[in-house]
Amino acid sequence: MNLSTSVPPRRVFHRLSIVAGNAIQIAGIVAAIVCLWQARSVHLRLVAFLLLIAAWTLLYFFCHGIAHWVVGRMVGIRFAFYTVGGPGNPGGYPTSLRWVFERLPFFGVQTEKASMQRARPIAKAIMWTAGVISSMLVPTLGAIYAWQVNVYGSRLFLIFAVFWAVGVLSSNWRSAGGDFAKARRVLSAS
């Protein structure tokens, strides 16, 4: 077994149909938008800041899987179902947070085997990178919006969000089981 590509299996808690998974993720993203909208107009600073944290968290958890699906469908890849489970690369998280993140509900999406066999390598690579890129950009854009509309605490939170995005990029870039590694493998094999 090649240790550079050997990763422990992802811990899966539940399976969902594509329709149900998309509906839940869209609802999570809409809830995040509502939180951001409310955070800009609420008068209690603590409540505004908590709404900002809630929005960022919702965006972080609900944008990844659906980004794979949207981009995958755009490049001709079909999907069988969603999974809800721990992260695909738990080793990418700091040791102090790994135990927690292994138990949080991350959405994953399972491709249809025949569709993946027909897909060009570049299509597969684009689909795999879409999730990580959305996990970096979407929550950070939410934090930028909060800062632009002067939500209490958003300046410091934006700094945190940018560092988190860099961490997401770094952990996925270095991980043998991360989406970037999958994209690199399929491109190098072509």
Image (spheres, grey):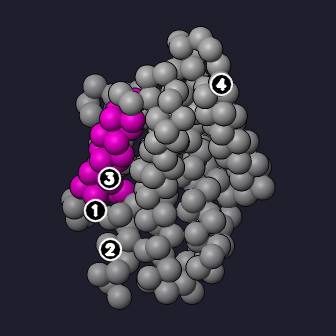
Q: Which of label 3 and label 2 is nearer to you?
A: 3
Please, what is the three-letter code of the amino acid marked with disc 4?
A: Ser
Helix, strand or loop at label 2? It is: helix
Residue at the disc numbered 1: 5
Label 4 – label 3 distance at C-alpha:
32 Å
The image's mark for residue 169 is 3
Q: Could you tell me the amino acid type at mark 3?
A: Leu
Q: Which residue is mark 2?
A: 185
* Disc nearer the start of the sequence (3/2): 3
Label pair 4/1, CB-CB below 8 angstroms? no
> Which residue is disc 4 drawn over?
41
Marks 1 and 2 in Cβ contact (< 8 Å): yes
Q: Residue at x 21, y 59 (%)?
A: 3
Q: Amino acid at mark 2?
A: Arg
Labels 4, 1: front one:
4
Disc 4 element:
helix
> Is residue 175 visible in the rendered structure shown here?
no
Range of magenta residues: 157-178
- Residue at the location (30% across, 40% down)? 163
Residue found at x 35% / y 27%: 156
Marks 4 and 3 in Cβ contact (< 8 Å): no
Number of the front mark, 2 or 4:
4
Question: Rounded to the nearest whole Å, what is the CA distance between mark 4 and mark 1?
Answer: 48 Å
Q: Which numbered marker is on residue 38?
A: none
User: Which residue is more in the foreground, 183 or 47?
Assistant: 47
Counting from the top left corner in percent of width and height, residue 49 is at 51, 20
Q: CA distance from mark 3 to mark 1?
A: 18 Å
Quarter occupied by the C terminus? bottom left
